[in-house]
Image (cartoon, rainbow, N blue to C red):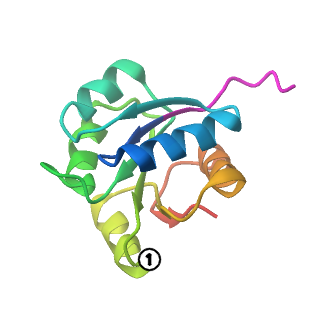
């Protein structure tokens, strides 16, 4: 059993099934997971809960993930990483992540151990330009 503190992840997605799947998946790999189903209130949540990683759905009603990222980044602690998360084409996702200043991007098809491993690596990496979470 590792004595390292759990990585705190905030998942923002308007799809309740996707949210539940990702939450269960990450929780089973010892992440501390919070979920939020709207783009509204994300900045405040990031400020008050100080997550290590924010997994942000790109296609969310009201305010798209890249716009939420810009607002939430201003409220986020220095260590918080933002990951754009989408089912859309990877090339489009990569260019959106770069334009939005995300720390990384991931396809929604990434789940389970693969997702946990990629987020752990991102958590350890110094903050910098958007790169795929490998």
In the picture, measured across the screen, residue 53 lies left or right of residue 43, that is right
Q: Residues within 10 Å of mark 1 (few under 14, many from 20)?
A: some
Q: What segment is highlighted magenta in the picture?
A: 1-9
User: Which quarter of the rendering shows the C terminus?
Assistant: bottom right
Can residue 82 be seen by looking at this rendering? Answer: no
Question: Looking at this view, is 45 or 101 the one in front?
Answer: 45
Report helix, strand or loop for mark 1: helix
Question: Looking at this view, is 80 or 19 the one in front?
Answer: 19
* Residue topped by disc 1: 90
Q: Position of residue 130 (x, y in %)?
A: 45, 63
Q: Position of residue 84 (x, y in %)?
A: 39, 57
User: Which quarter of the rendering shows the N terminus?
Assistant: top right
Q: Quadrant of residue 103?
A: bottom left
- Which is the main secondary structure of the residues drawn in magenta? loop
Q: Which residue sits furthest left?
A: 62
Q: Decide whether residue 7 is among the magenta residues.
A: yes
Q: Is residue 24 above or below residue 90?
A: above
Q: Residue at x 34, y 53 (%)?
A: 57
Q: Residue at x 69, y 23 (%)?
A: 5
In the picture, measured across the screen, residue 94 lies left or right of residue 28, that is left
Question: Looking at this view, is 27 or 106 the one in front?
Answer: 27
Can residue 18 be seen by looking at this rendering? Answer: yes
Q: Quadrant of residue 102?
A: bottom left
Q: Quadrant of residue 101?
A: bottom left
Q: Is residue 60 above or below residue 46?
A: below
Q: Residue at x 41, y 68 (%)?
A: 87
Q: Is residue 132 above or below residue 16?
A: below
């Amino acid at each position: 059993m590792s004595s390292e503190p759990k990585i705190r992840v905030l998942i923002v997605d308007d799809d309740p099934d996707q949210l539940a799947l990702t939450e269960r998946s990450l929780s089973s790999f010892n992440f501390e997971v919070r979920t939020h189903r709207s783009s509204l209130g994300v900045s405040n949540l990031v400020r008050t809960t100080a997550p290590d990683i924010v997994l942000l759905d790109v296609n969310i009603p009201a305010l798209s993930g890249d716009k939420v990222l810009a607002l939430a980044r201003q409220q986020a602690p220095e260590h918080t990483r933002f990951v754009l998360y989408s089912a859309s084409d990877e090339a489009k996702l990569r260019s959106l992540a770069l334009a939005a200043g995300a720390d990384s991007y991931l396809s929604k098809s990434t789940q389970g151990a693969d997702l946990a491993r990629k987020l752990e690596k991102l958590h350890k990496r110094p903050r910098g330009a958007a790169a795929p979470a490998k």
